[in-house]
Image (spheres, rainbow, N blue to C red):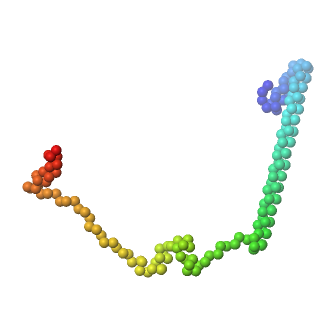
Amino acid sequence: MRGTPQQIIDKYNQLARDAQLGNDRVATENFQQHAEHYLRMLSEAQREVEARREEQERQNRERQAERDRERAERQEREAARQADPAEAPQPDVVDFSAEAAAPESGLVETPESKDAEQPEATERKEKPRRPRARKPKAAPAGEDAPAAAGKGDAPEAAE
């Protein structure tokens, strides 16, 4: 027989009823015993499942209680630390004297601070522009054209 334990129990009970209607006392008793066997097995399995579930719940409650205790301890330590100024984190001391503003202090110099120190630096100094190189003009289509072509061909003719 296949199925869940409850389905098997129901099936044997149905077979026992059918055997009883057929006046077969031996088959009826046999099927009832099978149904009772599976019923006992099902109840035992349910007890085991329930015991496992209760154990898991107990462990979960213990873990949660431990987390709550740790959280309470952390909060107490934090409250004690805040109450005791010696335990509180101390701010860094920053020196704003003229020496601290020097480039070796690690401070970044911004354009605004440069403008405040050197007002003449704001004037833009322009570099003299170099004239652009231009392509040579093409030779007129007159007498110079064959001479220009001859100049380019001279090294090839020498070979």
Residue 155: percent from the left, percent from the top? Answer: 16, 48
Residue 126: percent from the left, percent from the top? Answer: 34, 73
Residue 21 in view of the camera: no
Residue pushed farthest front?
159
Residue at 47% across, 74% down: 111
Total marks shown come to 0
Q: Nearer the viewer, residue 44 or 158?
A: 158
Residue pushed farthest left?
143
Quadrant of residue 129 within the rendered picture: bottom left
37 sits to left or right of 132: right
Q: Nearer the viewer, residue 43 or 57?
A: 57
Q: Nearer the viewer, residue 126 or 150?
A: 150
Residue 35 in view of the camera: yes
Q: Quadrant of the C terminus?
A: top left
Q: Quadrant of the N terminus?
A: top right
140 sits to left or right of 43: left
Quadrant of residue 125 within the rendered picture: bottom left
Residue 146: percent from the left, percent from the top? Answer: 10, 52
Quadrant of residue 67 within the rendered picture: bottom right
129 sits to left or right of 124: left
Residue at 46% across, 78% down: 115
Residue at 80% across, 30% down: 7
Residue 56 position (above or below residue 70)? above
Residue 102: percent from the left, percent from the top? Answer: 53, 76
Residue 21 position (above or below residue 93)? above
Q: Nearer the viewer, residue 6 or 57?
A: 57
